Image (cartoon, helix red, strand yellow):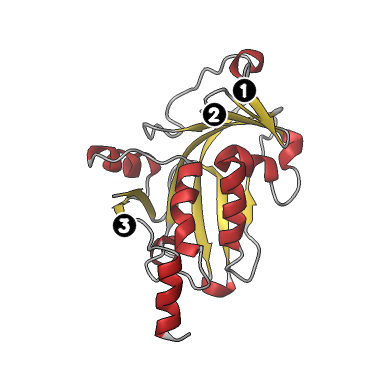
């Protein structure tokens, strides 16, 4: 691609927002570093919205966090997932508590009263809590879990980001093995360069070999 053509694409799609980076293999520690530096933690929906402009072009932006971070370690998604036999609740983890704190959820009738339902996924009135029934994420695409994690628009943007790679994304959810409740957090990881794919982990316990957290400046 000619440099002038690339410049034209960037003019049509303004450069993405600069970001602040913190590094930690531990989810809670990475989040606390961002908070201490004065940055709010992005939810999964906000993170994909932030990442999307890096890919919303014919050629990926050379400063894409995927190119610089997710090939090296987990990019933490500050969502808390509560898995039950009926389905999964997804909450924005604004304090980076991870799985260290139990969550007392009110009854679904009370929690989602006045909310909305999209493709079988329930959203609380302020969309702070989402619930995907188990049957919505049984297929390989795990659609219900992605919608609960990212919202309907950003779930679509996730698939568009994933289309830059030769293989489809892989979305991981845990097996309860008879448990009544299991908590996890989420993370993104990019495998094997352009020939590879993006993993969306919904079953993380909050540690990896390397990890990163970002926030817009």
Q: Residues within 10 Å of mark 1 (few under 14, many from 20)?
A: some
Residue 68 appears in which quarter of the rendering? bottom left
Q: CA distance from mark 2 to mark 3?
A: 27 Å
The secondary structure type at the circle numbered 2 is: loop
Provide the residue designation for mark 2: 127
Which of the two labelled residues, at mark 2 and mark 3, occupies the earlier sequence position? 3
State the residue lying farthest toward the left. 37
Percent across and percent down for residue 132 are 67, 33
Could you tell me if residue 99 is visible in this image?
yes
Q: Residues within 10 Å of mark 3 (few under 14, many from 20)?
A: few
Could you tell me if residue 61 is visible in this image?
no
Q: Residue at x 62, y 22 (%)?
A: 115
Q: Residue at x 68, y 40 (%)?
A: 144
Q: Residues within 10 Å of mark 2 (few under 14, many from 20)?
A: some
Q: CA distance from mark 2 to mark 1?
A: 8 Å
Image check: 179 left or right of 194? right
Residue 119 appears in which quarter of the rendering? top right
Q: Residue at x 23, y 38 (%)?
A: 36
Q: Residue at x 60, y 48 (%)?
A: 155
Image check: 129 left or right of 14? right
Which of the two labelled residues, at mark 3 and mark 1, occupies the earlier sequence position? 3
Which of the two labelled residues, at mark 2 and mark 1, occupies the earlier sequence position? 1
The secondary structure type at the circle numbered 1 is: loop
Provide the residue designation for mark 1: 115
Provide the residue designation for mark 3: 18
Percent across and percent down for residue 90 are 56, 33
Q: CA distance from mark 3 to mark 1?
A: 34 Å
Given residues 24 and 47, the one toward you in this image is 47
Asked if the residue at tag 1 contacts the one at tag 2, i.e. Cβ–Cβ closer than 8 Å, the answer is yes
The secondary structure type at the circle numbered 3 is: loop
Asked if the residue at tag 3 contacts the one at tag 2, i.e. Cβ–Cβ closer than 8 Å, the answer is no
- Vertical comparison of 170 with 29: above or below: below
């Amino acid at each position: 691609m000619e440099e002038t053509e690339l410049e034209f694409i960037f003019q049509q799609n303004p450069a993405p927002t600069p970001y602040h980076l913190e590094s930690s293999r531990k989810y809670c520690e990475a989040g606390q570093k961002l908070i201490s530096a004065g940055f709010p933690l992005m939810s999964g929906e906000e993170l994909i919205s932030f990442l999307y402009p890096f890919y919303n072009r014919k050629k990926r932006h050379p400063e894409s966090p995927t190119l610089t971070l997710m090939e090296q370690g987990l990019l933490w998604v500050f969502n808390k997932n509560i898995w039950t036999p009926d389905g999964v609740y997804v909450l924005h983890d604004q304090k980076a508590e991870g799985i260290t704190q139990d969550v007392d959820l009110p009854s679904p009738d009370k929690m989602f009263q006045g909310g909305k339902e999209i493709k079988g996924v329930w959203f609380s009135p302020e969309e702070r809590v989402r619930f995907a029934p188990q049957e919505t994420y049984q297929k390989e695409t795990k659609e219900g879990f992605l919608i609960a994690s990212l919202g309907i628009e950003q779930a679509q943007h996730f698939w568009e980001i994933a289309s830059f790679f030769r293989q489809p994304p892989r979305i991981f959810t845990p097996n309860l093995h008879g448990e009544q409740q299991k908590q996890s957090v989420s993370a993104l990881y990019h495998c094997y360069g352009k020939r590879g794919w993006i993993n969306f982990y919904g079953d993380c316990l909050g540690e990896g070999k390397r990890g990163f957290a970002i926030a817009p400046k």
